[in-house]
Image: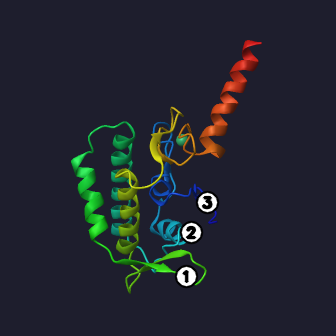
């Protein structure tokens, strides 16, 4: 963890973990990849280590992030997908080289192109977004019930009734707010 920067919210779904690098989108938003180095750090934590990142590549990453956010939100509420967001996701998906690698332990890893470019990592994230937005994976896109968040998340619970993007943050805060409101009533 680097001192002075907001920490990362990590989930099990790559694409929505990535959109979660900007949190509290409907409130006081928190940018969790404010510098190129923080994008390098985030990619490393998510199995997509790159050698370097320029300011322009960070811009590219943020553009992809916001496009995934828009498309996933539209999919969650069964709205038409915004064409410009779809275009960005497709461009990033096609614009990098990465190969799925099977480890001896039977795990999947990503091998990025020879120079381990940010664009290669973004192509993996874009492809992940495509698979959840296209409904290829077991789960359902939904919006977080926290009014200051409303992040699109991928619900893989058995009942598909998850309400919050993250139990430890949004879920907990809502519970506390309800508890406090009840205390006031009594
Ligand atoms: Zn949330």
How far is the residue under mark 2 from the one under mark 3? 18 Å
* Mark linked to residue 4: 3
Q: Alpha-carbon distance for marks 3 and 1?
A: 35 Å
Residue 127 shown left or right of residue 150 in the figure: left
Q: Position of residue 154 (x, y in %)?
A: 48, 48
Give the foreground label among 3 and 1.
1
Name the N-terminal-most of marks 3 and 1.
Answer: 3
Sequence-earlier tag: 2 or 3? 3
Q: Which residue is drawn at 60% across and 40% down?
A: 170
Q: What element carries label 2?
A: helix
Nearest-to-viewer mark from 2 and 3: 2
Percent x, y of residue 117: 38, 78
Report the residue at 64% width, 63% height from top.
Answer: 3
Quickly name the residue at label 1. 103
Q: Earlier in the sequence, mark 1 or mark 2?
A: 2
Q: Do the residues labelled 2 and 3 touch (CB within 8 Å)?
A: no
Residue highlighted by disc 2: 45
């Amino acid at each position: 963890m680097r001192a002075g920067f907001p920490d990362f919210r990590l989930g099990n779904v790559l694409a929505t973990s990535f959109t979660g690098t900007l949190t509290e989108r409907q409130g006081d938003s928190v940018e969790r990849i404010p510098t190129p180095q923080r994008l390098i750090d985030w990619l490393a934590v998510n199995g997509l280590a790159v050698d370097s990142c320029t300011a322009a590549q960070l811009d590219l990453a943020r553009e992809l992030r916001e496009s995934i956010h828009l498309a996933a939100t539209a999919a969650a509420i069964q709205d038409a997908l915004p064409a410009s967001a779809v275009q960005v996701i497709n461009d990033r998906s096609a614009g990098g080289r990465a190969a799925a690698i099977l480890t001896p332990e039977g795990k999947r890893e990503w091998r990025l192109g020879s120079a381990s470019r940010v664009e290669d990592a973004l192509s993996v994230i874009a492809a992940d977004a495509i698979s959840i937005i296209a409904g290829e994976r077991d789960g359902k896109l939904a919006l977080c019930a926290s009014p200051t968040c409303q992040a699109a998340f991928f619900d893989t619970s058995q009942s598909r009734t998850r309400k919050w993007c993250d139990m430890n943050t949004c879920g907990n805060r809502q519970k506390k707010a309800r508890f406090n409101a009840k205390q006031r009533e009594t």
